[in-house]
């Protein structure tokens, strides 16, 4: 019976998303943080910077490369990212007859922190252990129904302000109770190493164009430099300097591709000392010099 309900809920959710996306598109909705995606063809590899989020595949198949790991997931499976991480993704086996369809929503650390104070404390939730900050799991009926209710709410814009926050909080609760809940607990529980690294990541995201002082950043999260380096790499698979470089280059790509800015302007805006240094780092990351890469991606 539950499998029938899961299949039926998936069908209704797919139809509702198709109503909002009659053709291939990626669309932000009136509900803050809620995104709908449709691909009618396989996509080339696309770079992105994952924020804490849950992304559910309603139909199709997706490959995500985050850090040094690859995550493959399809219909009725979701991926949860609990800290900011650079990555890329690739849509496979999509067609106009069977488009790739997904829905995602940003996770709210304040909601998670609030729920953690209200939920029974699990003894394992505060362990100082490395844990993957990206998880893939099969969707449960409560999580799937929460997404469906959010999409239904898009047809009732007058109710979004009141009803959406309640559904979103409920969705966060179900995630904390799910098999992926442990990584969310660790990332959002005060005093854990992952939570300290998450604070450092937030600082880097907001200050990526500034020179990086590892010792000061380590002090910000109450760690020694060596301990900070070790735990930062455990959580992100990158050193802090590599992570900052990823932030700069991904933002530079966005500024050129989306906002049409030139190489020299972007180089200084994201924190490089010279356009030539920027171009070398960009080519090393993306395989092409900035100008040539833009020509290929815009064609």
Image (cartoon, helix red, strand yellow):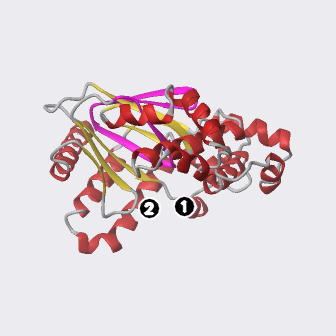
Position above or below: 63 against 112: above
Residue 86: quadrant of the picture: top right
Q: Residue at 44% across / 31% down in the picture?
A: 292
Element on which disc 1 rests: helix
Q: Could you give the CA–CA distance between mark 1 and mark 2, rounded to whole angstroms?
A: 8 Å
| Residue 67 spot, x, y in % from top left | 57, 32
Q: Residues within 10 Å of mark 2 (few under 14, many from 20)?
A: some
- Which quadrant: the C terminus? top left
The magenta-colored residue range is 44-73
Task: Give residue 38's quadrant in the image.
Answer: top left
Please identify the quadrant where the N terminus is shown: top left
Packing grade of label 1 (10 A; few <14, some 14-19, many >=20) is some
* 47 inside magenta stretch: yes
In this view, the residue in front, 44 or 282, is 282
User: Residue, x 39% and y 66% (percent of image)?
Assistant: 166
Q: Is residue 218 left or right of residue 158?
A: right
With respect to residue 9, does 153 lie above or below? Answer: below
Most foreground residue, 147 or 200 = 200
Q: Which residue is mark 1?
A: 115
155 lies left or right of 30: left
- Name which quarter of the figure residue 55 lies in: top left
What is the number of the mark on residue 169? 2
Is residue 182 among the parts visible in the rendering? no
Residue lying at 19% horizontally and 53% vertically, measured from the top left:
20
**Which residue shows up at 62% across the image and 49% down it?**
187
Do the residues under discs 1 and 2 have CB atoms within 8 angstroms?
yes
Residue 53, position as x, y percentages in the image: 47, 48
The dot on residue 276 is: none
């Amino acid at each position: 019976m539950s499998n029938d309900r899961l299949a039926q809920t998936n069908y209704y959710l797919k139809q509702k998303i198709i109503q909002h996306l009659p053709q291939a598109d990626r669309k932000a909705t009136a509900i803050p943080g809620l995104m709908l995606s449709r691909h009618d063809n396989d996509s080339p590899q696309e770079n992105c910077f994952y924020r804490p989020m849950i992304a559910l595949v309603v139909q199709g198949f997706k490959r995500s490369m985050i850090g040094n790991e690859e995550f493959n997931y399809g219909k009725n499976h979701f991926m949860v990212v609990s800290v900011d991480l650079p990555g890329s993704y690739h849509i496979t086996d999509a067609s106009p007859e069977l488009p790739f369809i997904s829905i995602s929503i940003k996770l709210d650390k304040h909601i998670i922190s609030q729920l953690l104070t209200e939920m029974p404390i699990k003894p394992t939730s505060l362990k100082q252990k490395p844990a993957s900050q990206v998880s893939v799991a099969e969707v449960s009926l409560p999580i799937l129904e929460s997404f469906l209710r959010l999409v239904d709410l898009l047809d009732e814009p007058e109710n979004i302000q009141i009803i959406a926050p309640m559904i979103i909080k409920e969705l966060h609760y179900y995630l904390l109770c799910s098999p992926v809940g442990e990584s969310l607990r660790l990332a959002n529980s005060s005093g854990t190493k992952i939570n300290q690294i998450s604070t450092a990541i937030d600082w880097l995201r907001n200050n990526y164009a500034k020179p990086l002082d590892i010792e000061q950043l380590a002090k910000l999260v109450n760690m020694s430099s060596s301990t900070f380096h070790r735990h930062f790499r455990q959580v992100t698979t990158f050193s802090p300097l590599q992570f900052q470089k990823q932030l700069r280059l991904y933002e530079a790509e966005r500024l050129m591709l989306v906002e049409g800015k030139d190489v020299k302007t972007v180089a200084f805006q994201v924190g490089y000392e010279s356009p030539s240094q920027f171009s070398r780092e960009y080519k090393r990351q993306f395989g092409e010099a900035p100008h040539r890469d833009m020509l290929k991606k815009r064609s």
